[in-house]
Amino acid sequence: MIIDAGFLNQWEHKGHRYGECMSHKDSPLMYVYIPKNASSWTKPNLKDFGWEFYNYHDDKLNKLALVVLRDPIDRWVSGIAEYLTLYHSTIDMHNEDIIEIIFDQLTFDDHTESQVKFTHGLDTKKCIFFMCNDTYSANFSKFMKERYGSDNKYSTYDYQHVSANSADRNKFKNHFSQLLQKNPQYLKQLEQHFAADYKLMEQIKFYDAR
């Protein structure tokens, strides 16, 4: 399969190239990470097992993929808060024109991009999917114990880059959460925009350690 280099590079200027993943030379697994889906928490834990960074497109990896997905609306709210914190922290969120521009565009960087783009070229039948919610750390810890036979304390480790740790992220996240509650049309726009993500999540089964 030939992948257009322009597609892979779409968000490289923001720090992410499609296909980025982690793996170990002796493992049949690879972890395909998606921004805002606990990737900053997962990557250091995989380093404990000697995993290194690859790109499954560039390096032609064909392994069983670990993929973490998140509710699209929840992820977008967190993602737009991350984007504004990084690039426009002084923006006036009470300017209605700015709000309209944001909801007209919706995707501004890798934090607000559709999750299916980060899985481009993967066979979903060769993926193990995890849900990014309050069960993720326990499920990940259980999976790593089952796969590697090693006890770990990952389920007790705090997530990284959470909104509560940043005043700006928390401010933006609360603002957009309230906007969605008060404006059903915005919520509908997001649901339509991320229709492919919802479709993927309906078609797959998530790993559950229980």
Image (spheres, grey):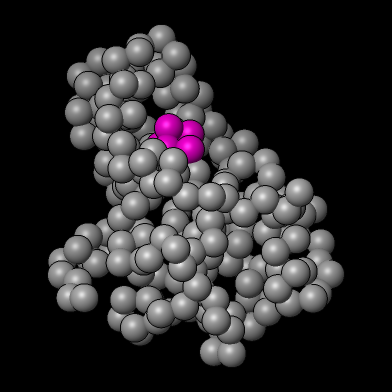
Residue at 27%, 59% (x, y): give it. 11
Q: In this picture, is 25 found above or below 120?
A: below
Horizontally, residue 37 falls left or right of residue 111, namely right
Q: In the image, residue 155 lies at what x, y percent?
A: 76, 54
Q: In this picture, is 106 found above or below 28?
A: above
Residue at 79%, 76% (x, y): give it. 149
Horizontally, residue 153 falls left or right of residue 10, namely right
Q: In the image, residue 153 lies at what x, y percent?
A: 81, 62
Residue at 62%, 36% (x, y): give it. 164
Q: In the image, residue 64 lies at what x, y percent?
A: 50, 73
Q: Is residue 24 visible?
A: yes
Horizontally, residue 182 falls left or right of residue 40, namely left
Q: Which one is nearer the viewer's eye here, 36 or 205?
A: 205
For residue 97, what is the image quadrant?
Answer: top left
Magenta-drawn stretch contains 75: yes
Q: In this picture, is 101 found above or below 78?
A: above
Q: Start and end of the magenta stretch?
A: 71-76
Magenta-drawn stretch contains 152: no
For residue 120, what is the image quadrant?
Answer: bottom left
Considering the whole magenta stretch, tell me its main secondary structure. Answer: helix
Q: Is residue 87 visible?
A: no
Q: Quadrant of the N terminus?
A: bottom left
